Image (cartoon, grey):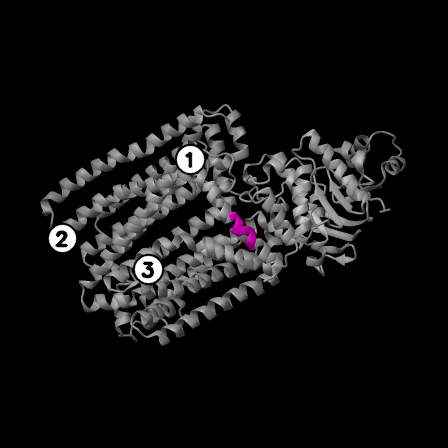
Amino acid sequence: MTPELAAILRKDRRSLRNLWRVLSRESLFKVSFVLLFATAMLSGLFLLFLDGFRFLAEFGGAGFMITRRLFSLFFLGLGGMLVISGVVTSYSTLFRSREVPLMLTGPFDEGSIVLYKFAETAVLSSWAFIFIIVPFTAAYALQHGLGLVFGVWMLAFTAPFLVLCAALGTLITLLVVRWVPRGRTVGVLLLLAVGAFAYHTIMRVGSQSAFESPVFMLSRVVPGLRLASMPAMPSWWTAEGVDAFAQGRPVRGLLFLGTLTANALMAALLVRQLGAAMFFEAYQRVHGARAAGARRGRLLPATARVCGFLPRDVRAIMTKDIRTFFRDPMQWSQALIFFGLLALYFASIRSFRYDQLPREWRNMIAFLNVFSVAAVQCSLASRFIYPQLSLEGQAFWMLGLSPITTRRILAGKFWLAAAGMLSVSLLLIVFSTRMLAVEAQVRGVALAVMTAVSFAVAGLSTGLGAVFLDLKTSNPAAIVSGFGGTVNLVLSLIFMLAAILPFGMIFHLSFLQRIPAGAVPRALVAAFLWLALITPLTTVVPMILGRKAMNGRDY
Amino acid sequence: MIVIDRLCKRFGALKAVDALDLEVREGELFCFLGPNGAGKTTTIKMLTGLMRPDSGRIVLNGIDIRHDPVAAKRIIGYIPDMPYLYDRLTPREYVEFVGDLYRVPGAAVTDAIERELDRFGLSDYRDALIGDLSHGLRQRLIYVATFLHDPAIMFVDEPLVGLDPYSIRMIKDLLRARTRAGMTIFLTTHILAVAEEIADRIGIIHRGRLVALGTLDELRTESGRAGSLEDLFLHLTAGAESPVSAS
């Protein structure tokens, strides 16, 4: 390690130590709330996974086979999310961080800068996944009577796996930024998505007649199982290695650990070498484009016309926000990736033959899909809508001095957020329910729930964004991860559960015949009344609180 | 010594820096002036290695920055107009970090922490978090840290932004003292009175081209105007299109 890298790591250690000073200034209530939320989330996920394992155990042979393959599937899914997270995070750490110019003018070679930023990417992109890995591992260990040592093996395999995924994400970012023509990123991403979907479809069709193995049969009901069971996949090495250790076969386990570690180190080396060769050029492309002032005036030329029916001042704010959204790749790329992945999954529903499952199963999947879209919506709203007002930052004086009331500012932001979320989520739900071929009643319920979630989450994020307004912080991640951001995310998730669960439970209990068929319509009416009560409350109350907070503060 | 040879940088159709030829001598305080968008920041970014020129050469004390960027960066210091500081370090820790980075001997770092933090009025804040410091105090800290490794060449972009009169005076004295000790300083500013007061030589860039170069008296003689630097600047950047030769 070079002395420069050692110096910057020493700086990080001190910075981390000083974090305690920052935390100790926070109110006890804030810290307790965040800790309580983290504990509740870990416990909730643990119980959910445990319930899932017990459910699978009830299936006997098929359940055993699925459980056996579950680690492959788990690491495949985790790996996919980690690579995406790595792409987004590495763009931010390599090309948007204000530390990079400092390093570029300091005595660092480009390889060292990329290596350091890659390490930062690996940590930032994967720490949150602890909230999935820990409860999953604990539930699996409890269900199968495995001891603490299983957790140690899991940790030993998880570390190189995380490094490998972060390296893949960083490499993709470097290659895209360096080689994809500017302004074509969306086209290339769409092309890649279409290509991946076509490949996936061809592979499925091509192999349908050839395979009769249990994995193939199970892959009919468990998507991704076949891919997860491919011996070339790092997720398979991880799963097999963990399984080998759990079954008392340490030599086999070490073989997989060695394979995984060697590949992770190789990937890190590739990041360093390729980074040394292309980082500076890539950096020039990102910042050269910005300096050129070559912003396209043609971006959304019709925006103002489309919003023509709105008052001019509200329209001005909305147009500005739309332009800001589309000119910030961090925002639209994350929305595109997450909603795109959901769309890809919904498009695959018929290739998994979910549409031929019994009616009750299709209903359950329909509600799980509503859950998925709503969860993505909550997280994107917390990430992008909540900090919107705070990010006005230094420019807030312009809004503050302009002859527009706080109420109209908030209303403009709310309607824009609600319209954006409604259009995407309703489209996805229509798509999902059509692919599942569910009844009109279920589709109607799903659309109603999605509409309620869109309005409530938009109201919560806009209103709480105003209540916890922070004009001093320019880093959106810092705003989002603060107390207000955490409260917003927690409340959004609670609303999502409160909105979806009653309907989901009615259909589920009716399937289990715990509710007589005649009582279902009455139960649905009660659930709709509940939804009609909580949605306006969750939408309007934060907006009123936000308006009061903004009117009452000094600028 | 800074040697800039036929330096060019384009952004699409815009020529940000157009065939810039310039030499800044050792121990000289050189002020680089120009209207907004003239190419000052682009030039300084290329000189500090933040931006790659399309063509041309930059040599810093005999080191070509393109061929050996790390060696070149070891001998320079750069104070940007909006410097980045680590909010979760204290001023003392930040100076120690910079000392580690440039391999400054530990005793010299300890000495600088005592002496320079005191000189810049930061002694009382040495163990406070940088995130809690005001803009002016942060600006002072960046001077302490950047001068720590005693760079042969210093680039300063808008040195006086957000500083109080006391600090401005201190910075001006510091820059003058350092040039007397042999440091080469390349400074950009919009405060023409400062350039007039402290610069050994002045260069004016307009639309990417160097339109004036010399001491204040030489500029007056060359332009045939006897007014202040402000008059000269407004005259030269209003209509001048043809470059002058570097002296």
Seen at 34% across and 70% down, the residue is A240
Q: Which residue is mark 3?
A: A348
Q: Is residue A12 magenta?
A: yes
Specify whether A66 is left or right of A396: left
Mark 1: amino acid: Gly
Seen at 76% across and 34% down, the residue is B194
Task: Using the image, tell me which numbered label, if any, was put on residue A512.
Answer: 2
Q: Give SS at disc 3.
A: loop
Disc 1 or 2, which lies upstream in sequence?
1
Q: Which residue is mark 1?
A: A465
x, y percent for residue A189: 47, 56
Which image quarter: residue A165?
Answer: bottom left
Seen at 51% across and 27% down, the residue is A555
Mark 3: amino acid: Ser
Q: Read off the magenta span.
A: A9-15
Which image quarter: residue B186?
Answer: top right
Could you tell me how far apart the alpha carbons at marks 1 and 2 are, in whole angstroms?
42 Å
Chain under numbered label 1: A
Task: Using the image, tell me which numbered label, if any, was put on residue B71.
Answer: none
